[in-house]
Image: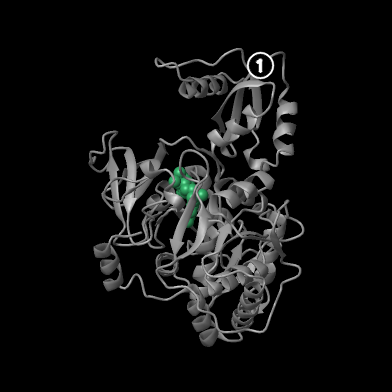
């Protein structure tokens, strides 16, 4: 993935330490033994279970290099499963709990997965090897060849780039570095108690510094079955949680609920918010209402993660999305012709570094990378002289629905599969709570169509609920650009104007 000279530099700098996830957990178990790791499991138990599950998965025929779709809710079983796969050198392909049959089928075909590791509550149809978390096929541990530190450890789903969701290959070396860097920035230690409220398979709660960062520091992970204030506040009180991570709409929900709760939230020291734009007035309420520090996190599953620092001045924490985790993260802000812009001007964010990919799995979408290996994030940012980035917008065709990324192209494809739909265009509509929601414009083929009917059609096709357009509107025709393409810009403007008109 990285040219030799870069790999050599990242090793020499101590970023890539040559450890695999399997060896890493073994070391943590030796260091932390009977200390609690996650959800009632000690470090040693997690390590032993990963060994026994790896052996059992091996007996079922899984081997190094195989891909396995992992579709599990938050819980210790997720950690057991992925560490078992890491030990085998098989690659987890991370699905989100919200995913349904259409997403699982896409992950399967894009990765060529050999098996599906799931739980009864989430399971979707799969023709082939299915392993359920309720019946883990443990077997006596045995020696396994295992992967190399430079091998791809897993495939993560891209939320960030235009088109159908792509798979992101992350190596043991690069991912462990991003986890260690994040753990240092957030000051994690053995007394850290992290509440995993977001779905653990997502890059943010998994690695920024998230569950893996807390394990690295010898801390304790508490898995929340859902991120509602009711569930989370009870866990914070009972487990004396010190830190958690949320997307902006949840932060808003928690702030509203915290003002009325009887739960004791006083153990909370740090709230990380990221995944989508955080409004400054919501940011401002975090310290006063929750009594803890705020950290903004602007990251992407492709790599680069920016954090505001714990000792940054308040105005930086409230109004920027942080600065890169690594001194060797290279960040360029460029104009439409890839010419670098001075600090303070808004442009396209390009990046490369010791934990940012240089290609997608199967070389999908090569245009997302420059000739010299920078990833085109699709984000429009402005850089301050301090190096902090402010996210100003987006150039890619993605809807960021409160942190959940929706590809309009994917949803349009599903809508076009309906026999009554001649054309479809999905665009973001401003929303005070989610930031954006999805609005589908549809041209019916013959006769009227209702939004309810189309939404039902998408549900029945097995599309995740968060991708189903919040509104569906039938129109006679789409506005077109000079070259005859559907003008999404004009459709977006229509929605914006309506909102301003109070419609
Ligand atoms: C505005 N937009 C943001 C922010 C991400 C940590 C945190 C988040 C993600 C994530 C992650 C944003 N303000 N604070 O992987 O490790 C938008 C950008 C970005 C895209 C990436 C992590 N934080 N975004 O959200 O892969 O548009 O990762 O390119 O899901 O989310 O989405 P994703």
Image coordinates for residue 20, horizontal then vertical, percent: 46, 74
Question: Which residue corresponds to the image point at 43% horizontal and 17% vertical from the top-left?
Answer: 481
Q: In terms of depth relative to the viewer, which is nearer, 219 or 396?
A: 396
Image coordinates for residue 21, horizontal then vertical, percent: 49, 73
Mark 1 secondary-structure assignment: loop
The image quarter containing residue 68 is bottom right
The image quarter containing residue 127 is bottom right
Q: Is residue 105 visible?
A: yes
Image coordinates for residue 379, horizontal then vertical, percent: 40, 41
Q: Residues within 10 Å of mark 1 (few under 14, many from 20)?
A: some
The number of numbered discs placed on residues in the rendered structure image is 1
Q: Is residue 291 visible?
A: no
Q: In terms of depth relative to the viewer, which is nearer, 308 or 465?
A: 465
The vertical placement of 318 against 130, above or below, is above
Image coordinates for residue 254, horizontal then vertical, percent: 63, 52
Image quadrant containing the N terminus: bottom left
């Amino acid at each position: 993935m990285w040219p030799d000279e870069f790999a050599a530099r990242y090793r020499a700098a101590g970023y890539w330490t040559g450890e695999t996830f399997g060896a890493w957990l073994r070391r943590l178990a030796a260091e932390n033994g009977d200390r609690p790791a996650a959800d009632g499991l000690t470090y040693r138990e997690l390590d032993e279970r990963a060994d026994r599950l790896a052996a059992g998965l091996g007996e079922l025929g899984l081997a190094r290099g195989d891909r396995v779709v992992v579709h599990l809710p938050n819980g210790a079983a997720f950690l057991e499963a992925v560490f078992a796969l890491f030990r085998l050198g098989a690659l987890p392909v991370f699905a989100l709990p919200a995913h349904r049959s259409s997403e699982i089928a896409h992950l399967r075909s894009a990765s060529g997965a050999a098996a599906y590791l799931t739980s009864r509550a989430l399971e979707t149809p799969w023709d082939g090897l299915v392993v359920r978390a309720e019946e883990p096929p443990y077997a006596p541990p045995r020696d396994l060849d295992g992967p190399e530190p430079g091998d791809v450890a897993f495939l993560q789903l891209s939320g960030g780039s235009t088109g159908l969701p792509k798979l992101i290959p992350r190596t043991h070396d690069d991912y462990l570095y991003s986890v260690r860097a994040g753990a240092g920035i957030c000051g994690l230690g053995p007394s850290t108690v992290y509440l995993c409220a977001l779905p653990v398979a997502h890059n943010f709660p998994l690695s920024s510094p998230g569950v893996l960062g807390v394990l690295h520091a010898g801390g304790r992970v508490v898995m929340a079955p859902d991120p509602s204030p009711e569930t989370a506040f009870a866990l914070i009180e009972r487990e004396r949680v010190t830190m958690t991570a949320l997307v902006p709409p949840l932060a808003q929900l928690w702030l509203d609920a915290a003002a009325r709760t009887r739960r004791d939230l006083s153990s909370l020291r740090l709230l990380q918010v990221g995944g989508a734009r955080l409004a400054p007035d919501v940011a401002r309420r975090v310290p006063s209402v929750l009594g803890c520090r705020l950290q903004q996190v602007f990251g992407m599953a492709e790599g680069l993660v920016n954090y505001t620092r714990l000792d940054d001045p308040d105005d930086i924490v409230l109004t920027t999305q942080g600065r890169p985790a690594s001194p060797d993260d290279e960040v360029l802000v460029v104009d439409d012709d890839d010419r670098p812009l001075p600090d303070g001007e808004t442009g396209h964010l390009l990046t490369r570094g010791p934990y940012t990919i240089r290609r997608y799995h199967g070389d999908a979408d090569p245009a997302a990378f420059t000739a010299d290996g920078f990833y085109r994030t699709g984000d429009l940012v402005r850089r301050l002289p301090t190096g902090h980035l402010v996210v100003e917008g987006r150039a890619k065709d993605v809807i960021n629905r409160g942190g959940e990324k929706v590809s309009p192209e994917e949803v349009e494809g599903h809508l076009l599969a309906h026999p009554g739909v001649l054309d479809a265009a999905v665009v973001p509509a401003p929303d005070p709570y989610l930031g954006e929601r999805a609005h589908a414009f549809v041209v019916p083929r013959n006769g009227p169509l209702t939004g309810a009917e189309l939404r039902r059609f998408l549900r029945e096709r097995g599309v995740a609920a968060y991708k189903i357009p919040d509104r569906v509107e039938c129109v006679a025709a789409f506005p077109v650009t000079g070259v005859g393409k559907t003008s999404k810009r004009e459709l977006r403007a229509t929605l914006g104007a309506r909102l301003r008109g109070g419609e």
